[in-house]
Image (cartoon, helix red, strand yellow):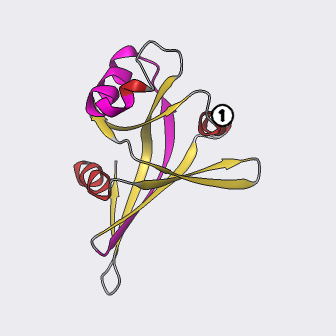
Amino acid sequence: MKRVNDFLKKASVYYLATVEGDQPRVRPFGTVNEFEGKLYIQTGKIKPTSKQLAANPKAEICAFADGTWIRVSCELIEDDRFEAKKSMLDAYPNLRHMYDENDGNTQVFYMKNAVATFSAFGKASEVVEF
């Protein structure tokens, strides 16, 4: 899990895919944070991402850095605790002008049943489960 966290931070931008009905939806994200032994991402409850994950928690993340890419297939499970939200916002203080632990909008999700595949041209893929 640490390797996945480090890679996503190094890439700085990753792409999150969710499903809306039968239509895939992909958008750039940048937040990833380890809290209590789990990897978390963050969004706002007013965003379509939130509604899509409520209907179907299955998601995939993809990022590229230094000739290697990662794909993380997982379920994203909401953690509505103050502490989880605070940990994320403390890790990304630049978000505090838009989000707050108590604003009713900040939402964090942890990765469950995650399978991360690291790939690079000419090399065998490596799989990490967490």
Relative height, residue 36 to residue 130 (above, below): above
Q: Left or right of 124: which side holds 19?
A: right
Give the magenta part as a residue range: 67-95
User: Which residue sits furthest bottom?
Assistant: 122
Judge whether residue 78 is colored magenta.
yes
- Residue located at (33% from left, 53% from top): 12
Give 82 or 123, whichever is nearer the viewer: 82
User: Which residue sits furthest top?
Assistant: 102
Give 127 or 106, whichever is nearer the viewer: 106
Give 104 or 78, whichever is nearer the viewer: 104
Give the image location of residue 71, x and y in percent: 43, 61
Q: Secondary structure at mark 1?
A: helix
- Residue located at (38% from left, 15% from top): 82
Give the image location of residue 91, x and y in percent: 27, 32
Instruction: State the image quarter where residue 31 is shown.
Output: top left
* Residue identified by numbered label 1: 51
